Image (spheres, rainbow, N blue to C red):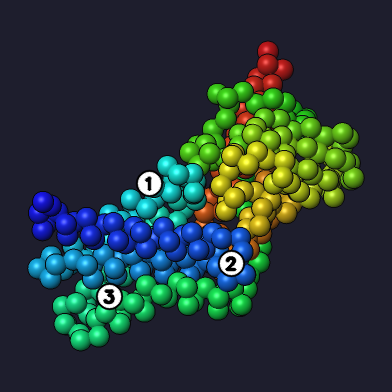
């Protein structure tokens, strides 16, 4: 026979986990996409809020009296939910890494709210917890009716290079094959994003077709819109998500997908002194979610990691060529 305390532990973990899986399934149904979507405030905030509230509601009163219990115990079903969805390939590591801080914070808040009602011994405690659990299902249709809000953001990066512009510019317009040990994109590597391979350009000038090739099938199709030799090159960017293998990236963070797209990029070369040039690289990207403010922090971080990686490759190659030319 299972001891009462073990029963309680199983109860406060398993039932919130079952709740999370049921809601996740509903929000993932294609047939209900007009009402529910994973990429929404209703799911990313209200679901963990409900998990936290349900966890504390099912807990013993003596445990709930401790603030640390109300704050941190809801993290247990959250982490179990994360591991289960990853093992079942329902969600990817990249997506979870981005939303986990929100999930943990919202679950703690839900735990504190439920703890308040439990400690005050409200007669309608069951009603409160029922409403909290239903909040994602009630709020999501309203959120979907209001709609997503596309917003454009800018990722701005630069690097200083001790080489002549005649050595730098060829490495800007075309990037020969990047070896693995040259790749310093640590964030994109940890998130499982494709690694840059090379960039090709059919000719230097407006209308030129540039192709930035990454592994795992990702290709940025670029058209040059402004060109000043050894000074500036601007281009539009089109990433076709259908070229990427379906198992490569989480659909919620795939570049060129429904929620995250890159629009254009610009290189600018500025002379700082007789021996040093500053190479700027900036891009515009678009987010289409109902929580762009939070998503933009991650998207900008990702874009800057990609750009700084390319700039570092250009710097090392240009400076090496400059040193060789001086010998």
Task: Name which quarter of the figure residue 9 lies in.
Answer: bottom left
In the rendering, at what x and y percent does residue 202 appear?
Answer: 87, 33
Label 1 vs 3, first from the N-terminus: 1
Disc number at residue 243? none
Q: Examine the rendered structure and indicate whether residue 162 appears above or below residue 105.
A: above
In the rendering, at what x and y percent does residue 184 appear?
Answer: 54, 33
Within-10-Å neighbours for mark 3: few <14, some 14–19, many 20+: many
Task: Name which quarter of the figure residue 104 lies in.
Answer: bottom left
Tell which tag, 2 or 1, sits nearer the viewer.
Answer: 2
Residue at x-position 72% and y-position 41%: 243
Within-10-Å neighbours for mark 2: few <14, some 14–19, many 20+: few
Q: Which residue is mark 2?
A: 32
Query: What's the distance in space between the residues labelled 2 and 1, CA to CA?
Result: 25 Å
Q: Which residue is mark 1?
A: 83
Query: What's the distance in space between the residues labelled 1 and 3, CA to CA?
Result: 26 Å
Within-10-Å neighbours for mark 1: few <14, some 14–19, many 20+: some
Q: Which residue is mark 3?
A: 113
In the rendering, at what x and y percent does residue 314 appear?
Answer: 66, 32
- Quadrant holding the C terminus: top right
Q: Examine the rendered structure and indicate whether residue 96 appears above or below residue 31.
A: above
């Amino acid at each position: 026979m299972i001891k009462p305390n073990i029963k309680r532990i199983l109860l406060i973990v398993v039932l919130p986990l079952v709740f999370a899986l049921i809601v996740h399934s509903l929000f993932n149904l294609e047939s209900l996409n007009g009402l529910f979507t994973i990429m929404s405030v209703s799911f990313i905030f209200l679901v963990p809020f409900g998990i936290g509230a349900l966890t504390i509601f099912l807990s013993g009163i003596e445990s709930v009296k401790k603030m640390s219990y109300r704050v941190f115990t809801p993290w247990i079903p959250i982490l179990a939910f994360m591991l289960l969805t990853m093992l079942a390939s329902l969600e990817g590591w990249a997506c979870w890494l981005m939303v986990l801080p929100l999930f943990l914070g919202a679950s703690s808040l839900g735990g504190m709210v439920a703890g308040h009602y439990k400690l005050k011994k409200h007669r309608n405690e069951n009603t409160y917890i029922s409403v909290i659990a239903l909040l994602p299902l009630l709020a999501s249709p309203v959120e979907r009716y209001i709609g997503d809000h596309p917003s454009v953001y800018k990722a701005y990066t630069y690097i200083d290079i001790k080489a002549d512009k005649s050595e730098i510019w060829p490495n800007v317009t075309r990037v020969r094959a990047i070896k693995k040990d040259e790749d310093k994109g640590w964030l994109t590597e940890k998130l499982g994003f494709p690694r840059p391979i090379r960039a090709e350009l059919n000719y230097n000038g407006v209308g030129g077709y540039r192709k930035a090739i990454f592994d795992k099938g990702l290709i940025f199709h670029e058209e040059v819109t402004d060109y000043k030799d050894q000074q500036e090159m601007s281009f539009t960017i089109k990433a076709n998500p259908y070229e990427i293998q379906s198992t490569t990236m989480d659909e919620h963070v795939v570049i060129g997908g429904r929620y995250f797209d890159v629009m254009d990029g610009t290189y600018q070369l500025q002379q700082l002194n007789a021996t040093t040039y500053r190479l700027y690289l900036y891009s515009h990207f678009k987010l289409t979610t109902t929580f762009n403010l939070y998503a933009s922090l991650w998207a900008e971080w990702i874009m800057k990691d990609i750009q700084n990686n390319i700039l570092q490759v250009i710097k090392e190659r240009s400076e090496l060529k400059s040193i060789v030319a001086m010998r």
